[in-house]
Image (tube, helix red, strand yellow):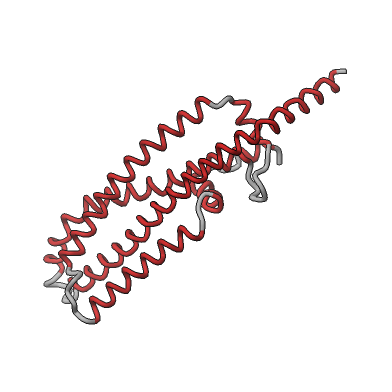
Amino acid sequence: MDWQERATKEKSLSEVYWKARKIASTRRNFGVAVIVFVLFGLLVAFDWHFDAKVLTLAALNTLLSQIAEIGFTLTTSILGFLIAGFSIFASITRPEIFAGLAKLDHKDTGLSRLQFIFFNFLLVFIHYLAFLAMSIVLQLVLPLAPALVTALSPHVPSASVIVWWSAASVLAVLLGWLTFLLMLLKSFIWNIYQAVLVVIVTGDAIVALENKLANSTASKDQ
């Protein structure tokens, strides 16, 4: 497979996602998110078992609304910053450098150095865009939750319990996901620093590669 085919191999965001998650994130990020999820799950189990009434349906609705608001504000701000940064980085870098990066392998990942740089941007784009969509859905659906419980109660005796557990589960997932986004942002900052170093360090290799290609073309002409 030549470098042009490797650079254009991915045909969808899902293909990019499964490759990018191996280099743009770490197990520690996922581990911290799982810890937050489990801790909140234990709080939910404690509240249910001992009937502490700390996490009432109204409290869960309020917490979900706050998560949706925080998520919407955070993701729109970060996405605006990332899109601007991505555009500037892509526009000020010479195409010859991008081509050179696409020809060089990045360690033992099976990806080029160009893919390493851009996959870092794309993984953050994908996660923050997905969380933004979830935040919008929550902001639209949550105002209907009390009316839904009221409407279901005469027909489903355990409607309030089902809604309570559903809300608690969604909140646990969103808290873990929000934690992961913050950890991913930390990794993104580090990976951007690494990407800049890759561009700097690769400069000599790109020049050598271009000279080699030029000499090879000259030899064929002779």
Quadrant holding the N terminus: top right
- Please state if 63 lies on the left or on the right of 115 as rendered: left
Image coordinates for residue 5, horizontal then vertical, percent:
65, 38
Image coordinates for residue 96, horizontal then vertical, percent:
63, 26
- Please state if 113 lies on the left or on the right of 119 as rendered: right
- Please state if 118 lies on the left or on the right of 133 as rendered: right
Kindly indicate the quadrant of the structure image that contains residue 152: bottom left
Image coordinates for residue 103, horizontal then vertical, percent:
68, 36
Q: Residue at x 84, y 18 (%)?
A: 221
Tell which of 200 and 10 is nearer to you. 200
Q: Residue at x 19, y 61 (%)?
A: 61
Q: Residue at x 34, y 70 (%)?
A: 39
Tell which of 8 and 64 is nearer to you. 64
User: Residue most toward the right?
Assistant: 222
Image coordinates for residue 164, horizontal then vertical, percent:
22, 69
Query: Up-down: is 201 above or below 91?
Result: below
Query: Up-down: is 68 above or below 196?
Result: below
Q: Residue at x 46, y 44 (%)?
A: 189
User: Residue most toward the bottom?
Assistant: 50
Counting every numbered tag in the picture gives 0
Query: Up-down: is 46 above or below 92?
Result: below
Quadrant holding the C terminus: top right
